[in-house]
Image (cartoon, rainbow, N blue to C red):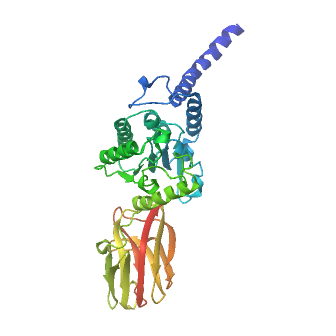
């Protein structure tokens, strides 16, 4: 009788557990390197040395355990050069959430295979890719590398058509590393041509700034002629940051006159002009109210409840106070989270403001300056509004 009760109660419970175990095993199998290239998408080589297989399986299992923690990050996707950033990215991207998805020794075909689990599952804010150098060592032709890169970009675009994609050109190396300059240049030409009409993709030239006069890596930045040292990573970060600012900046170019709405009300008078990289606002006659002279960029799409950071570089010949504001661009104007007094000194300085957008209007918000209660000028450059 006891055996019958055990069978009736316990065995059905075990049966319920079997699908969960099977699902876990299936997920685990998706993270492991397949035993044959035949089951993998793309073309060209996949490395299968023991050290590589072990590293591949280990890093992918670690990433699977922190998908939730990495959601919304900017993902760096690549091989050993990407892995070399480490998880702290050498403290060079402290103002943004980043995630490392580089595996030493990986090829473009391997990256295509692991794209879904390692990258897409974290719903990345953007993807920065560097790939192709290991394919060359494995005797892949540049056209094969190009085809795999195209497949990765197509999958990223299908996942999110608005997500920024930055493709870093293959770094210079050396023929002594089975990575001759002419082959690397050919890969870079093919990739650049392949994405030329894709507005989602930014191609970052990370070949020319690192190459010597023969097209090879420089020892002072690539001691082994393949992997960058700290100086090389700092230089790479320096190339990336302007591209990232441009991609994530919600404002239009600071020094484009047509980007600005300049307003004079009642007795307030002023001028607006471009001076090189700067936009210059001049209050020639102060109004009886500060809002009688204003300058804004309009039609901005700010998300209700989201946090934003506004930054700019500014100076004033006289030294003067302005008000930095965010509001809606409609007749019933009101503040949407930012209205702060700011003293602009005579020497150029950087100013930053953070705010939470509230009571916004989709596609019809504005950010700028209230200038009207003091005479004098303010020169502004590097205006940047980004969502935190």
Determine which quarter of the picture holds residue 157. Answer: top left
Question: What is the number of callouts on the image?
Answer: 0
Residue at horizontal 44 percent and vertical 57 percent from the top: 209
Q: Where residue 147 appears, x then y in whole percent?
A: 34, 37
Q: Is residue 388 visible?
A: no
- The spot of residue 197 in percent (x, y) is 28, 49
Residue 81, percent from left and from top? 52, 45
Q: Nearer the viewer, residue 269 or 171?
A: 171
In the image, residue 1 sits, relative to residue 274, either above or below, namely: above
Q: Residue at x 46, y 78 (%)?
A: 314
The answer to whether one can see residue 245 in this image is yes
Question: In front here: 164 or 191?
Answer: 191
Quadrant for residue 156, please give it: top left
Rendered view: 373 above or below 332: below
Which residue extends farthest top? 1
Relative height, residue 42 to residue 191 (above, below)? above
Q: Is residue 138 left or right of residue 53?
A: left
Corner quadrant of residue 155: top left
Q: Quadrant of the N terminus?
A: top right
Q: Does residue 1 appear to the left or right of 40 in the view shown?
A: right
**Residue 284 on image: x %, y %:** 36, 91
Asked if 173 appears above or below 143 in the picture, the reply is below
Comparing 91 with 384, the one in front is: 91
């Amino acid at each position: 009788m006891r055996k019958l009760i055990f069978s009736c109660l316990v065995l059905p419970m075990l049966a319920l557990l079997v699908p969960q175990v099977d699902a876990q095993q299936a997920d685990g199998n998706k993270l492991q390197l397949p035993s044959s290239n035949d089951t993998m998408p793309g073309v060209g080589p996949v490395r299968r040395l023991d050290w590589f297989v072990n590293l591949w399986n280990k890093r992918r299992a670690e990433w699977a355990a922190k998908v939730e923690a990495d959601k919304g990050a900017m993902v760096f996707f690549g091989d050993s050069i990407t892995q070399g950033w480490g998880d702290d990215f050498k403290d060079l991207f402290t103002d943004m959430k980043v995630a490392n998805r580089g595996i030493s020794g990986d090829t473009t075909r391997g990256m295509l295979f692991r794209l879904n689990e390692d990258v897409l599952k974290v719903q990345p804010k953007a993807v920065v890719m560097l790939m192709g150098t290991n394919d060359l060592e494995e005797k892949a032709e540049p056209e094969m590398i190009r085809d795999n890169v195209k497949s990765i970009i197509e999958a990223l675009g299908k996942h999110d058509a608005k997500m920024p994609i930055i493709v870093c050109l293959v770094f210079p190396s050396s023929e002594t590393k089975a990575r001759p300059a002419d082959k690397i240049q050919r890969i870079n030409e093919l990739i650049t041509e392949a994405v030329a009409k894709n507005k989602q993709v930014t191609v970052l030239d990370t070949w020319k700034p690192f190459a010597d006069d023969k097209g090879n890596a420089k020892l002072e930045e690539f001691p082994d002629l393949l992997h960058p040292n700290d100086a090389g990573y700092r230089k790479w970060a320096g190339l990336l940051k302007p591209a990232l600012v441009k991609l994530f900046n919600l404002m239009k170019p600071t020094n484009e006159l047509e980007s600005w709405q300049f307003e004079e009300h009642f007795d307030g008078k002023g001028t607006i002009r471009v001076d090189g990289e700067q936009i210059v606002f001049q209050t020639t006659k102060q109004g009886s109210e500060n809002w009688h002279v204003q300058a804004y960029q309009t039609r901005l799409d700010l998300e209700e409840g989201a946090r934003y950071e506004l930054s700019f570089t500014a100076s004033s010949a006289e030294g003067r106070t302005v008000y930095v504001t965010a509001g809606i661009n409609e007749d019933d104007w009101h503040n949407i989270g930012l209205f702060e007094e700011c003293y602009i000194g005579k020497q150029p300085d950087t100013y930053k403001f953070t705010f939470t957008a509230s009571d916004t209007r989709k596609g019809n918000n504005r950010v700028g300056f209230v200038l009207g209660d003091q005479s004098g000028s303010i020169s502004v450059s590097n205006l940047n509004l980004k969502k935190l």
